[in-house]
Image (cartoon, helix red, strand yellow):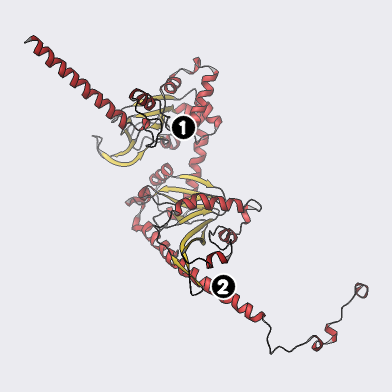
Amino acid sequence: MHRRLRDTAEVKRIQALKALFKKVIHMVSLNNPWKDSDDDQKINSYVKRNISTRVRARRKTGFLAAAERTLIRTPHVIRTIPERMKLCTLFAKLRCLSRFTPKLRARLVPVTRLIAVDAGRVIIRQSDVPITVYFVITGEVHMIQNRDKDGDGLLKAIIGPGDMVGDMELLEGIKRTHTFRAATNCELLVLFDYDFAQILGPYMTKIWDEKKRALKALDYFDFLDDDQVMEACRFGRLKQYQPLDTIYCDDIGSMTNVHFVLSGECLILQCLNMSVSLKKGKKVFQLMPTSAGDVSNMFRKGVRSTFSLSSKSEDVSKIDLVELVESSTSSSKDNGQNTTLNRTTPVVESHFIDVGTLTFGGIFGLGETMEHRVIMARTTVQCLTLPRFFLLEKKQNPGNIWERRLLYMDCMIPSREALFAHFLKACDWRKFKNDFIQESLKPSDNDVTHAGDIPIICRIVESSEDVN
């Protein structure tokens, strides 16, 4: 009887250990920082080595190792010079601190603190006096606007790695306007108000004032009150793009940033992917569907490299986009027309068309059609970006002004099919013009004029001595 009870207890213990092992494996598999790609060649049949490889996987961006956490928590007075240099290098890799200059990051090293926050903990409470600024390294934080004393409120935004929390109230000198609550386990860098005022205060104040001036310069935001202007400055970003940089390519829904052009010129570039075949000695173009071909990679790789090579030998501010578009057309035209004419199977050609130019006050990113289309910088461009979900809120969208603006843009900017029809007309006109010129230059039987018919006064050539 005693042996039977002992065997039962042993079986239960083994089952409990197996369940615990499965739970640990499940937690490790779901932990994103330890995931590797599926085509990892390090995995083999040796289980212990596989586990060790998983644990020592390459560190993801923004994820702190145990040694780095220990280094940040070490008091600055006992840090060695190599440790301080290592900490400066670490701060340069963090997304939340990469926006600052190296000098400012070096000044932040002795005063920042690292804290870990559990899910559900309130980081900042509405109506409190602001005394801290937080930099999110990992995790998600919910920005909530309280409606009652119980803390229930409306979720306004989700703050992720690389964002700063609590700086707006210090810059404006007001109390907390929202409650920030950790949605997951988070790692935060903390900076107190007196250190913020001395180190980051002038830099952040300058950027904050530039955002306000940008909002006032655009007539679209004349209806915003002071609270809305502060919210727009909180979510907005000022970005600068160099000539030929791709500004906007893909539409990712409500999380897309809407761009407002402050200075410079933006180019709307359309790619027409078409098949070319030969019928009765004439080239026939047919527009291919948007699902055929990966034009996004073509924009990200081919167009950028082609334009860059074309612009090396000339002033960037005086680039002729017509020449660039013609040089970037990946057709068989460059190799000679005989190559295309000798083929009986359709040939795929990609033609890039300059649709139009956006200058000061231009808008893009509201959800307009962007099939095989990108927005590029013709010159140095400065833009104010605001999240689309912020603009489409009822308070920032009186009278559906942004939907009406989107309808206007869709009506004014030609579609892909309209551009293809225009391309066919341009090809027909170019062929007619060339044929007409060649026909006009051919000798005719009606032209019986000879050199002797020209008056002699028109054939006298003056020498340089006569002129002098």
Using the image, determine if residue 212 lies above or below residue 115.
Answer: below
Task: Write down the residue under mark 1.
Answer: 94
Closer-to-camera residue (364/216): 364
Relative to residue 95, is residue 121 drawn left or right?
A: left
Do we see residue 126 in this rendering? no
Closer-to-camera residue (32/70): 32
As drawn, the residue found furthest toward the left would be: 1
- Check whether the beta carbons of the residues at disc 2 and disc 1 lie within 8 A of each other: no
Using the image, determine if residue 235 lies above or below residue 376.
Answer: above
**Kind of residue sitting beneath label 2:** Arg
Q: Secondary structure at mark 1?
A: loop
Percent coordinates x, y for residue 388 in the rendering: 38, 50
Q: Earlier in the sequence, mark 2 or mark 1?
A: 1
Task: Write down the residue under mark 2.
Answer: 430
At 45% from the left edge and 34% from the top edge, which residue is drawn? 96
Relative to residue 38, is residue 446 drawn left or right?
A: right
**Kind of residue sitting beneath label 1:** Leu
Q: Nearer the viewer, mark 2 or mark 1?
A: 2
Relative to residue 95, is residue 51 drawn left or right?
A: left
